[in-house]
Image: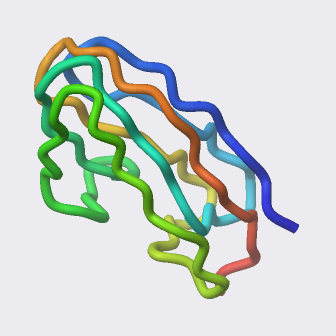
């Protein structure tokens, strides 16, 4: 079953999107992001990046459709964060599942 997290961040640096769940890994299935201004964003957990810096332009949505196997899976017991390159509002959502990763 897919879960959904709201993205609504506006400060430069690392912003938690999905909190850590003990003994579970976060598997990202889809996401949509839109920025109020030009900014680069990077998905990460702890200090490990899942993506490179993705440049977002003002009011141009980035829509990444559903993939059953997921785009990336975090380490067990770690959160999912979005690293913003500047203090610009970024909103959207992340569809994810919590899995047992061995």
Give the total of numbered labels: 0
In the rendering, at what x and y percent does residue 7 appear? Answer: 52, 30
Residue found at the very far front of the displayed protein? 60
Rendering colour mode? rainbow
Within the image, what quadrant is residue 59 found in?
A: top left
Within the image, what quadrant is residue 19 found in?
A: top right
Give me the residue at 33% from left, 51% from top: 43
Position above or below: 77 against 7: below
Within the image, what quadrant is residue 57 found in?
A: top left
In the rendering, at what x and y percent does residue 61 appear? Answer: 35, 42
Position above or below: 11 against 21: above
Give me the residue at 43% from left, 56% from top: 63
Q: Nearer the viewer, residue 25 or 2?
A: 2
Q: Nearer the viewer, residue 65 or 19?
A: 65
Residue found at the very far right of the displayed protein? 1
The answer to whether residue 27 is left or right of residue 87 is right
In the rendering, at what x and y percent does residue 29 appear? Answer: 60, 69
Task: Give the position of the N terminus as an image quadrant.
Answer: bottom right
Give me the residue at 19% from left, 40% from top: 56
The answer to whether residue 53 is left or right of residue 4 is left
In the rendering, at what x and y percent does residue 28 appear? Answer: 56, 64
Task: Give the position of the C terminus as an image quadrant.
Answer: bottom right
Give me the residue at 55% from left, 63% from top: 30
Position above or below: 82 against 50: above
């Amino acid at each position: 079953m897919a879960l959904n997290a709201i993205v609504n961040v506006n400060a430069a640096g690392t912003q938690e999107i999905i909190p850590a769940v003990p003994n579970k890994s976060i598997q990202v299935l889809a996401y949509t992001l839109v920025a109020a201004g030009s900014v680069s964003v990077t998905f990460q957990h702890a200090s490990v990046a899942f993506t490179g810096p993705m440049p977002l332009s003002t009011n141009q949505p980035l829509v990444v459709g559903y993939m059953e196997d997921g785009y990336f899976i975090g380490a067990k017991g770690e959160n999912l964060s979005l690293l913003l390159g500047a203090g610009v509002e970024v909103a959207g959502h992340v569809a994810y599942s919590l899995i047992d990763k061995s």
